Amino acid sequence: MEDTLVTVAIHTYEKAQILRSVLEIHGIEVYMQNVNPLLPAMSLGVRVRIRQSDLDRALNIIENMKNGDAVSQALNEERVLLMPVDFSDYSIKICEFGFRVASILGLKAILFHTYTVAKTVMATIGDAYATKKDEENKKQAEMASSEKMNQLKEKIDERMEKGEMPKVEYMSVIREGIPEEQILEYSDLVDPLAIIMGTRGCSQKDLDMIGSVTAEVMERANVPVFTIPENTHFITFDSVKQIVCSTNFDDEDLKYYNDLLKLICKMASTDVTVHFIHYDSNEDPWAEVKLRGLKDYYSELFPSINLKSHLLQGSDLLTTYDEFIRSNEVDVISLTTHRRSLLTRMFNPSMARKIVFHTNTPMLVFHAQ
């Protein structure tokens, strides 16, 4: 009975999630049982189950796991790109772009989907019935998500066979929970080279929550995030001609500009132009000098890239940025965002969040520690 499910471990929810991620990275499908649908993190005896046919391979993997960094160890030889998908028509375009990036950089891709299950109010209809109903809803949602993921993978495989997408090794992962929280949690586990995602989900259209999940991931992730708006034309790095690099002259950001320019040399066309820009709202007399010095410094390090500097001034940041982006036909915006407290983010959204809600231009966001 090759398809019989067997239990390979019983753990707390946190340890079960780690084991699940390790096994999935190695291509083993995992099912979890005894998870509290209301408070998953409080589950104690979570059963990690796999197919009988995968048992020998899974036991060897488990035997080699020595600590909580097992996921990072499993990916140590091969970095990955993490691509959250929601099965909208736009998801396949995100995959097309992500697979091209993965092919150029020699990376593996992970398609990641999160589904949400509405919880039943126990006080209204009783604990036992509510728990059973939640389990049924969860099973149905998981099955529906698995079916849609398989359909997406069939499209990808078909396009790879036709030569419409590069052949890249990839895997898929499905999780239950709040999308942004699950994306961030899984990103911390696998430590991808970057996260590539769209700025609008199909389930968000009716709620008019444009980019809310992406904006949250963009601010809180520990890895670079590349965002592609739904209503922008699909691009490849070969077609990128104009890139904006926004700076506030923070010393710790220098290495991110260096990483970006290295990436451009490897992926973009030879006639690409990078614009270093700074929005001067305080009329800093040294701003233009510092901006020109930054441009000259990187011109010596990357002579093959055409570098320019621009000091932007105006009454409104977003309007000024938008005018520059439009007039220069910018293909990609790159900037660095800094980790801030929840209270600060609620009452004073970062420039990155403001721009992602405002622009139709793809963005590459680096995260200062």
Image: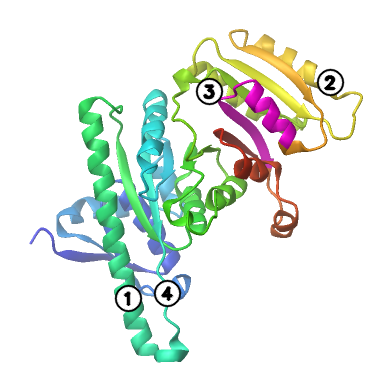
Identify the residue shown where x is 76% and y is 28%.
278
The C terminus appears in which quarter of the rendering?
Answer: top right
Separation of residues labelled 3 and 1 (CA atoms) = 46 Å
Separation of residues labelled 3 and 2 (CA atoms) = 26 Å
Quarter of the image for residue 90 reads: top left
Closer to the chain start, of discs 2 and 4, is 4
**How far across and down, in percent of the image, does residue 131 sit?**
36, 82
Identify the residue shown where x is 22% and y is 50%.
57
Closer to the chain start, of discs 3 and 1, is 1
**Mark 2 or 4, closer to the camera:** 2
Q: Nearer the viewer, residue 203 or 293?
A: 203
Q: With 188 as the anchor, is 71 left or right in this view?
A: left
Q: Secondary structure at mark 1?
A: helix
In the image, residue 216 above or below residue 36:
above
Question: Mark 1 highlights which residue?
Answer: 135
Identify the residue shown where x is 34% and y is 87%.
129
Determine crowd level at label 1: few under 14, some 14-19, many 20+ residues with C-alpha closer than 10 A. Answer: some
Q: Which mark is residue 43?
A: 4
Question: Mark 3 highlights which residue?
Answer: 263
Question: Mark 2 highlights which residue?
Answer: 288
Q: Secondary structure at mark 4?
A: loop
- The amino acid type found where label 4 is placed reads Ser
Separation of residues labelled 3 and 4 (CA atoms) = 43 Å
Q: With 178 as the anchor, is 175 left or right in this view?
A: left
Q: Secondary structure at mark 3?
A: helix
Identify the residue shown where x is 20% and y is 29%.
161
**How far across and down, in percent of the image, does residue 243 sit?**
60, 23
